[in-house]
Amino acid sequence: MSKLNFMAKGLMTLSLLSQHGAWAQSAKTVERPPQFVMFAFDGSYNNEIWQYSRDFTKHKKSQGVDTRFTFFINPVYLLTPATKTTYKAPGGNRGSAIGWGDDNRDVSDRVDQMNEAYQEGHEIGSHAVGHFDGSTWSQSDWESEFSQFDYIVKNLFSINGLRTTTQGFKGLVFLKDIVGFRAPQLGISKGLYPVLAGHGFKYDTSKVNNENYWPRRNEFGTWNFPLAQVKEPGGARKWISMDYNFCVRDSSRILSEDPQAMNVTAYDSKKGKTIKNNDKFCLKAITAEQKAKVKANMLAIYRSYFNNNYYGNRAPVHIGHHFSSWMSGAYLEVFYEFANEVCSKPEVKCGTYNELLRFVESKSASELDALQAGNFAKLPRPKSALTARPWELNISMKEQDGAMKFALSGRDAKRAGLKKFVSIDGVTKELNGDLTLNEIRTLVKQGEDALVRIAVKDRMDKEVATATYKVDKVGTDAETVHTENIEDKWLEGHLDGAHADEMDITRGH
Amino acid sequence: MRFKVLLAISFMLQMAGCGFEAAPTSALETPEDSYHVIYGKDSIRDENSASLNSVSSVALVKKETFERYQKDQAIYTAAETFGGEDLSWTNQPSLAFCSGVLVDKDLVLTAGHCLDAMTCEDLVFVFGYEAQGKKPVGIACKEVVKVKNDLAQAKLDYALIRLQKEAPALPVSMQTAALKVGDGVYSIGYPLGTYKKKATGRVRSMDHGVAISTLDVFEGNSGSPIFSAKTHRLVGILSSGETDFVETDSDLKVHRCGESECSGEFIISIEKVLADIRK
C-alpha cells in the first residue's frame, strides 16, 4: 500500500468517527481525486500571446511542472478582409463582432501558433465563429454557426489561397480533437445544446455554477464544465472566474474612486504605441497603484477558490481569460502568476479540458455523487490566516416618494462603521439617507440614461458590497427607475465587449 | 551549509545543558485542561509568560500590516475578518497570518505553506505580540533557507527562515524522541492572528511522523511551536487541521468537536523536520 493510500485510509477511519461527517453514513466513499485546474483562453487573435503561453508552458516543463492550456478559438481570425464574406453571421448579425485576421501572413502565423500549441499538448476548442451573443439564437442559427466553423477550419487554406506556412503546415492538425465549446459572452440559448452534441462536441464551458460543482452531463450527453461564481473573501459579492467580468466591476470601482481614471494611458513598448481608455466599462490603462489593487483582488479571489476546492471536495477549478491586456495587463499577469503558484502543488493537474473529460467519463453517476459530496479523505486545511471569510450583506433598493431608498440586509448588515457611497456619472459622495431623483437630475443631462452605483465600505474604507441601478431618460416624463441590480447580470457572465481590447491593442482592428 | 551546523550545534548544546526530564528554563506550569473550544472544552488562553518557550514564539506578519500597527492605524479584529464572535478573545486585532518559533539565534521554523503566497520581502517576524506585553519587536526576513510544503505525500510542511538580525530571545530546546499516542502537548501561537495564546491537547493518533492532536488551534496557528507537556521541549510544528467555523444560512459558529471527532490537528514532528533539513 502506498504511503498516500495508507494516509488516506487513516484519515478515512478518523472521518468515519466524526459526527460532523454526515456523509459518512449516507453515501459511498471514493479515492481522493486530483485537483484539476483548468486554465483556458477565449482568444486566438494575438500571436504574441500564443507565443508567450507556449513559452510559459515550456519553461514550466523545464522545471518539472506540467502546465497546459485550452484555447477556444474564433475562425474569423482565420479569414482576412479579402475573404471575410465567406462567413455569414446568423441570427440577424452581420460581419464579425471582433474583426478579422489582418492578411495571409497574419493568418499563416496564427495557423503555426495553433498547430504547434496543439502538438505541444495544449488543447484547441471552439469559441464559435463571429463572437456574437447567441442568447437569442434559434437552433438553426446555431446549426449555421457550427457548420460555418467546420467549413472555415477545414478549408481555410483554399479559402485564403494560403500556401504552406513557415512551419510547414498545410492545414490545421487538431480538427478531430475539437470537442469543447465556450459560447461568446457566455450567451447560450436552448437551441445550442442539440446542435452542440450533433457536431461532436463533448463538453461545454459556457455556464456558471458554484465553486464546488462537479461536472454532470446534460440530456444530450454533453458535459457541463462551468466557470465559477466565487465568493469574495472579506466582501459580500460573487465574482465569475473570468477576466472580462472582473474588468467591468473593477472599472466601475476605479472610476468611482477617480473620475480622471479614463485619462490614464499606458505604453506598449513592443508596438511603440500609447494605449488610451475608450471604454468606461473595461479600462485598458490604469495607474500602477490601481493595477496592484486589481491584481491583489483577483489573486485573493482565485486563491480562495482554489483552496476551498483543494482542501474541500476537489471540484475542478475553471479560470477563463482572454488574449487582452485590460487593466494595463493585470489580468494576464495574474493568469500566469496563479498558474505558477498552484500547478506545482501535490495532486494538482493543470492539464487541458480533454483530460478532465477523460476523468469524469471514467466515473459512474454514484461516484460523481460521492465526489460532489466530498466523500473521500480530504486533505487537512492549512492553519494559516490569509483568507478572510465572505460577508453576508445584501443591498436592495425601492423607489418611493421621489427617491431611491437603499436597504442593507444579511448577517453583516449590523457591523459597526459601514458607510454608503453613491456614484453617478463620475461624481461620488457619501450617502446619508435616501437618494432623491432630483439629485440625479442635477447630475445627468435631461433625457439621458444614468447608472447609479451604490458602494458599501467597511470601517477601514474597503469596498465590501456594491449594486448598480439604471435610471432611463432622466428628467423626462418617461423617466424610469429600474429596481434590478445590473451587477446580477455580471454574474451570468453575459457581457458585451469581451475581445474589444484584443482588437484595439493590435494593428488597428 | 551554515544553518545545518548552527542547528546541530544549538541542538547539542541544549541537549547537553539539560536532560530530557528537565524543563529547559523557567518551567511552565502544567497547562490546565479544564477548557477546550474545538476538541472538548476551550483550552485557549492569552499567553504572557516570560518563559523561554513563550518568548521564542514569533508571529509572522505582512510588512504592510505591521507598518499600520506601528503607526497605531486601525487593524481588523479577528471577529471582523474570520468570525468567532462567540469567543472572548476575537475582538483583539488580527495581526499575524502564521506563527513560528526561534530555533537558533537568527533562525525561525514555521510551516512551509505559510510562504505559499508570500515572499521573504513581504514578511516581518514579530516577537512579543501579547495581550499585556511590551511593544512588540519586528525583524525582517533575510532569506528562506529551506521550505517543504507537501503534507499529502512527503508529509512535510515546514520552512526554515533566516532573520536579518539576531532575535531578542533564546532559541527553544528540542525533543527528538518520537511523539506517542496519548502524549500531552501544548501550542504557543497566534490564533486568527490575535495576541499570543496557548492551547493544550493530546496526541490522538500518529501517521508517518505526523501527530494528529486535539489542540484547540485556529487559522493563524500554522507554524506554532508544539511543546511536550511533560518535558516542555519542542516536539513539532503545527501544520493543518479542521476548518475553524461552521456556517449556516444565518450564522457562523466556532467548529466544536468532541475529543475523538473531526479530522484532528496535524503536527509535523521536529524529528522529521530535522531529518529532512539534514538531507
Image (spheres, coloured by chain):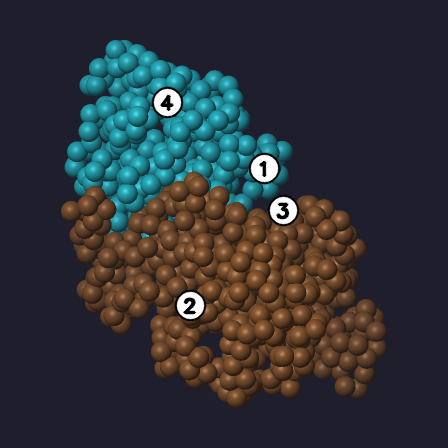
In the picture, measured across the screen, residue A78 lies left or right of residue A59, that is right
Mark 3 residue type: Ala
**Mark 2 on the same chain as mark 3:** yes
- In space, the residues marked 2 and 1 are separated at their CA atoms by 49 Å
Q: Which mark is residue B64?
A: 1
> Could you tell me the amino acid type at mark 2?
Asp
Do the numbered discs 4 and 3 sit on residues whose CB atoms are within 8 Å?
A: no
Q: Quadrant of residue A437?
A: bottom right
Tell us which disc is closer to us: 2 or 3. Answer: 2
In the rendered image, the vertical position of residue A464 relative to residue B31, given as above or below:
below
The letter of the brown chain is A
Camera-side residue of A299 and A165: A165
Which quadrant is the N terminus of chain B positioned in?
top left
In the rendered image, the vertical position of residue B196 relative to residue A84, given as above or below: above
Q: Nearer the viewer, residue B75 or A18?
A: A18
Q: Position of residue A290 (x, y in %)?
A: 67, 49
Q: Is residue B232 visible?
A: no
Residue located 29% across and 63% down the image? A371
Q: Which residue is mark 2?
A: A177
Name the chain letter of the residue that bears numbered label 2: A
**B163 or A113: nearer the viewer:** A113
Q: Colour of chain B?
A: cyan
Disc 2 is placed on an element classified as helix
Q: Label 4 is found on which chain of the structure?
A: B
Which one is earlier in the sequence, the residue at label 2 or at label 3?
A: 2
First of labels 1, 4 by sequence position: 1
Which of discs 3 and 1 lies nearer the camera? The answer is: 3
Q: Position of residue B215 (x, y in %)?
A: 28, 40
- Expressed as whole percent of the image width and height from the top left, the position of residue A183 reads 53, 73
Q: Which residue is mark 4?
A: B103
Q: Nearer the viewer, mark 2 or mark 1?
A: 2
Q: Which residue is mark 3?
A: A292
